Image (tube, coloured by chain):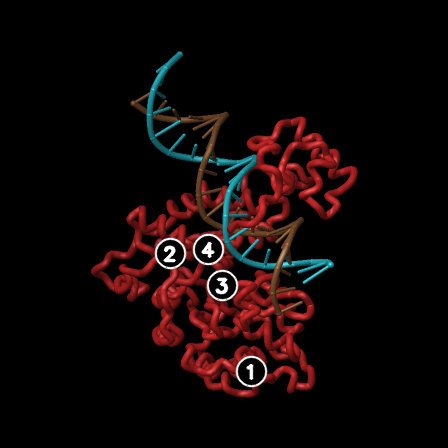
Chain colours: A red, B cyan, C brown
DNA sequence: AAGCGTCCCAACCGCTTATGA
DNA sequence: CTCATAAGCGGTTGGGACGCT
């Protein structure tokens, strides 16, 4: 049994909006606002339209300061970078591009930008030679999306970090190659349709990421995965149902939800999250951010390594992650035990977190964040 | 000019999330 | 806490525009 329709389908006009309808809607909203109720709006405005349709028309076309026309190179780069980090979260991407709507960006990506990037892709490495990404050729049978994640995945990427000439990590560590080798990125980002289309096109699954690296390397600024002050988060926490069942994405007294509203790009996310991470709230948020552990390791207190991490600041990545795992079983509520000291005090802005959190309805974490990097 | 295929984008559909009772 | 409903979101699609033969 589906939900009740939002309007009387028989009595609403569908299809393209006429200039008269546009004028009516625009005039009404400019004069009276939306009143916070789109469902009631069409009747008040004298439109034979569904409220949803009015909302879409306003948000995507009529509202002030909507930018139409060509995307700039800078916008291209932002879209590419964000797509590579958070996948098809169009509304989040749109929030970084003033005047652009999620629908616009989605259309642009699907029809143009994706192709543009593909055409810029460097040729795939010959299969018989030693590639910069040696394990590509071992993973041709990768499942498109999603794949079960054995706990060993947490470790496998760390065992052989490679240096890629495409990447410009400020500390010289290549973030992407291990991801490619691990299978993990492709398995857990929400980019399945892209990778499927790549497969259909007969391309190597890694072409897109090669392209991303190439693209960033050949742009004016290096950006993707190499910023010194960005937190990049893949994926999100669980669904509302999962959250109430105790999974990673738990709501908080401030109304936020670690896996949803907190998802952002740049330092604002991490500061917001960490500053808010005291006591009980810290537990929830941190669970979202650091719930990466294999199921065979207790996840009690998961996440408080945020505060611990700074102590491992100068150690190499592999060592850091091992340390994080070791400290996982430490204090269950480290932050509140820490005399209300905000994590942000200990967490510097160079933290870079890559990965994905996918929970099922149980408390067992199935997919894990993979990297924690300074 | 007609027919056909492809591209593009506005709009729709239905699922998820937010919110308030 | 649950439930109902509105809003938000992202995948998909219909059909017009365009280009090629």
> Which chain letter goes with mark 1?
A
> Which chain letter goes with mark 2?
A
**Number of the label disc, if any, that sits on residue A234:** 3
From this view, report whether residue A323 is shown above or below residue A58. Answer: below
The spot of residue A235 in percent (x, y) is 49, 62
Structural distance between the alpha carbons of marks 2 and 3 = 18 Å
Which quadrant of the figure has residue A67? top right
* Residue position marked by numbered label 2 in the rendering: A210
> If you read the primary sequence from the N terminus, does the residue marked by circle 1 or circle 4 appear first?
4
Q: Nearer the viewer, mark 2 or mark 3?
A: 3
Structural distance between the alpha carbons of marks 1 and 4 = 32 Å
Q: Do residues under tags 2 and 1 come within 8 Å of each other at their CB atoms?
A: no
The spot of residue A275 in percent (x, y) is 66, 73
The spot of residue A187 in percent (x, y) is 38, 62
Structural distance between the alpha carbons of marks 4 and 2 = 10 Å
Structural distance between the alpha carbons of marks 2 and 1 = 34 Å
> If you read the primary sequence from the N terminus, does the residue marked by circle 2 or circle 3 appear first?
2
> Which chain letter goes with mark 4?
A
Using the rendered image of the protein, determine whether residue A304 is visible from the camera's viewpoint. yes
Structural distance between the alpha carbons of marks 1 and 3 = 22 Å
Q: Nearer the viewer, mark 3 or mark 4?
A: 3
Q: Do residues under tags 2 and 3 come within 8 Å of each other at their CB atoms?
A: no
> Which chain letter goes with mark 3?
A
> If you read the primary sequence from the N terminus, does the residue marked by circle 4 or circle 2 appear first?
2
Q: Do residues under tags 3 and 4 come within 8 Å of each other at their CB atoms?
A: no
Q: Secondary structure at mark 1?
A: helix
* Residue position marked by numbered label 1 in the rendering: A308
**Number of the label disc, if any, that sits on residue A216:** 4
């Amino acid at each position: 049994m589906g939900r009740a329709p939002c309007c009387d389908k028989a009595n609403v006009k569908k299809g393209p909006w006429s200039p008269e309808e546009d004028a009516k809607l625009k005039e009404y909203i400019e004069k009276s606002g939306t009143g916070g109720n789109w469902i009631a709006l069409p009747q008040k405005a004298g439109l034979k339209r569904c409220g949803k349709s009015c909302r879409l028309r306003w948000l995507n076309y009529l509202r002030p300061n909507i930018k139409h026309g060509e995307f700039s190179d800078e916008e291209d780069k932002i879209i590419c970078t964000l797509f590579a980090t958070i996948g098809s979260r169009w509304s989040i991407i749109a929030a970084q591009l003033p005047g652009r709507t999620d629908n616009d960006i989605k259309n642009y990506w699907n029809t143009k930008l994706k192709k543009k990037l593909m055409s810029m892709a460097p040729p795939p490495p010959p299969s018989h030679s030693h590639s910069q990404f040696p394990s590509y050729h071992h993973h041709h049978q990768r499942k498109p999306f999603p794949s079960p994640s054995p706990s060993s995945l947490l470790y496998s990427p760390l065992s052989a970090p490679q240096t890629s000439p495409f990447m410009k990590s400020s500390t010289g560590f290549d973030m992407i190659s291990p991801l490619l080798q691990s299978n993990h990125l492709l398995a857990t980002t929400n980019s399945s349709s892209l990778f499927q289309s790549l497969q259909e096109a007969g391309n190597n699954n890694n072409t897109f990421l090669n392209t991303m690296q190439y693209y960033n390397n050949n742009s004016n600024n290096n950006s993707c995965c190499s910023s010194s002050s960005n937190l990049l988060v893949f994926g999100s926490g669980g669904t509302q149902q999962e959250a109430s069942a105790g999974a990673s994405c738990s709501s908080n007294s401030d109304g936020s939800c670690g896996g949803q509203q907190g998802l952002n790009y740049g330092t604002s996310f991490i500061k917001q999250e960490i500053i808010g991470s005291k006591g009980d709230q810290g537990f929830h948020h941190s669970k979202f951010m650091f719930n990466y552990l294999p199921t065979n390791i207790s996840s009690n207190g998961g996440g408080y390594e945020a505060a611990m991490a700074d102590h491992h600041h100068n150690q190499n990545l592999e060592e850091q992650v091992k340390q994080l795992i070791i400290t996982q079983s430490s204090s269950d509520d480290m932050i509140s035990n820490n005399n209300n000291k905000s994590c942000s005090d200990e967490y510097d802005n160079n933290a870079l977190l890559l990965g994905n959190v996918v929970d099922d309805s149980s408390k067992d974490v199935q997919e894990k964040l993979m990297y924690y990097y300074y």
